[in-house]
Amino acid sequence: MRGFTRDSIVQLLDRKTIWLFAVVTVIMVAALIVVGNARFQGGPHGEIEFDAREINEMLGNPMLSVFSSFVSFLVILTVLLTAGTIPVMLVPGRAEFYLSKPISRTAILLNRLWGIMVAYGLLIVICGLIGYATMYFVFSVSVSGIIYLFLLNLISLFIWLSITFFAGVALGSTSMAIVTAGLVWFAQWVLQARELIKGVVDSRALEITLNVMYFVLPNTGDLSDLTVKLASGARVADWAPLYTSLGFAIILMIVTLVIFNRKNY
Amino acid sequence: MNVVVTEDLTKIYNAGMKKGGITALDGLSLAIGQPEIFGLLGPNGAGKTTLLKVLLGITRISAGSATIVGLPPDNPASRRKVGYLPENHRFPPHLSGLGLLEFTGRLYGLRRNVIDSRAGSLLDMVDMDKWANTKITKYSKGMQQRIGLAQAMMSDPEILFLDEPTDGVDPVGKTEIRKVLQKIRDEGKSILLNSHLLSEVESVADRVGILSRGKLIKTGSVDELTSRESQFEIEAEFGNKLFEIPAEVGKKISLSMNRLIVELKDEKQVNWIIDHLRLKKINIRAVKPIKISLEQSFIETVTEREVDQS
């Protein structure tokens, strides 16, 4: 990988990012322990006592969703922390360092993407496993499809990185990369509620637009629901959020590579 | 063998709404041999850095062609035997000096043992071994230039592209860098040197090219560029003897007891002067072409060009 994976790890350690992940994980672990040891009272006169483990079982394992949100949060944290990777790499004076080496621009970008995926992906998996181990010991929750949870979150990381890489190459600014990711997140959040919108606004054009947009833009919200279903071993009826989001990311990476290969630095 | 060849190389930058764009390189043809130190001179905005970037594939060619060690710049393999020290470089700030050399070695696809041995010897050569594990951001400008030169040499390149290599380096450091450049040339390699410091170019370059508004307006050896055409200084024992020169030979610029300065119609006419001095039994001590500094030659060339264009 021409040193990009190692460089991403060195960069991660240098920026002390690892401590941020450690703090988030410690907060998660502490919250799980506190909630796990709490006693809850129920019944008309509070005569029935439950512990958190029993409530979790009664409510159909909501802890899995909490845990999935924790891993998704780590993904978002990674996206925010790495949004500046490409703009910072391509500032005048530094771009020349990378581009003057006997390695194609396509390889530079893909190796950098792979480096981030490995360095931060590993960090997400380690922090996630610590959270999972805590959840297992406190709530006795074992997730049969835990591997799917990590795998789909890593796919989600790739989708978000394709957006920040595109903005980084096309716009050359860290803040614009974050704003672009934010806009896509907002759009997919709106599109998740497309059925509700269609019910309120009676417009054929709007309906078509929303449907097209839904299949064009990544649907990481729906992908998150799909992740929980897969992890809990439930049947997944609709794989479209995974295919369309992954397709979006691959096409966006190709567009990014085309722009990067044509640009003057 | 020529390591760098360009033919009618043209680079036009898109100027947004402006029609036609900005011409940074205008039909530039150049060949750099091996071994050779080629100094590239030119006022700000002449296109010196653009030429290096085009040759390295950092900036795309608009028209014409270029090859480095026989390969076009858009082929990454053309950069395998090229080292580059950019002007105003900003190396990855999270790396130490040693880390930068190791990363550079990996980008060149070198083996671990080659990286280790080469990094060690280069750190020693640029006198940075004591600071090898210090982060680059803590280095002074001179130290950054030295580590930059070391990273440019990591691949044991056939040709080095150096853009203002002594920028910010103290006089002792400059002398050291000059020695390194000469050593590289003695090893049979080539250097394309961009520098504003004309005295520096004059002291190391074998050939010099003057670039103005994207055009290569003059090339030649330092001797050729610094010689006043047909002007000679003759040291001889004139005493009070008169010495006249016919108009068809040239003209006398000045004459003192032991020094004559002449401007000849043709360089070969210097033989006429020598013959007639001997006829007059005037002892000749030396005959030498009058030289000007490279700086003076550069200013005259660029000024003439500006006048011609206006």
Image: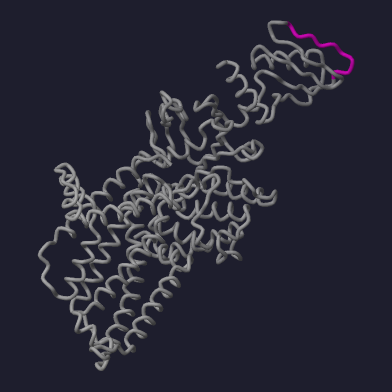
Indicate the quadrant where residue B66 lies.
Answer: top left
Whole-percent x, y for residue B120 in the image? 53, 64
Indicate the quadrant where residue A41 lies.
Answer: bottom left
- Identify which residue is drawn at 30% across, 52% down: A184
The answer to whether B230 is drawn above or below residue A166 in the figure is above
Whole-percent x, y for residue A27 in the image? 40, 77
Q: Residue furthest right?
A: B240
Tell me, yes or no, if residue A16 can be seen here: yes
Tell me, yes or no, if residue B11 can be seen here: no
Q: Quadrant of the N terminus of chain A?
A: bottom left
Answer with left or right where residue A58 lies relative to residue A115: left
Answer with left or right where residue B237 lies relative to residue A207: right
Is residue B240 part of the magenta span, yes or no? yes
Q: Quadrant of the C terminus of chain A?
A: top left
Q: How is the image coloured?
A: one colour
Answer with left or right where residue B199 lies relative to residue A220: right
- Identify which residue is drawn at 66% across, 11% down: B265
Whole-percent x, y for residue A63 in the image? 26, 78
Whole-percent x, y for residue B281 in the image? 82, 16
- Identify which residue is drawn at 58% across, 51% down: B145
- Identify which residue is drawn at 55% across, 51% down: B149
Residue nearest the viewer, comparing B182 with B162 = B162
Is residue B255 part of the magenta span, yes or no? no
> The magenta stretch spans which residues?
B238-246
Indicate the quadrant where residue A142 lies.
Answer: bottom left
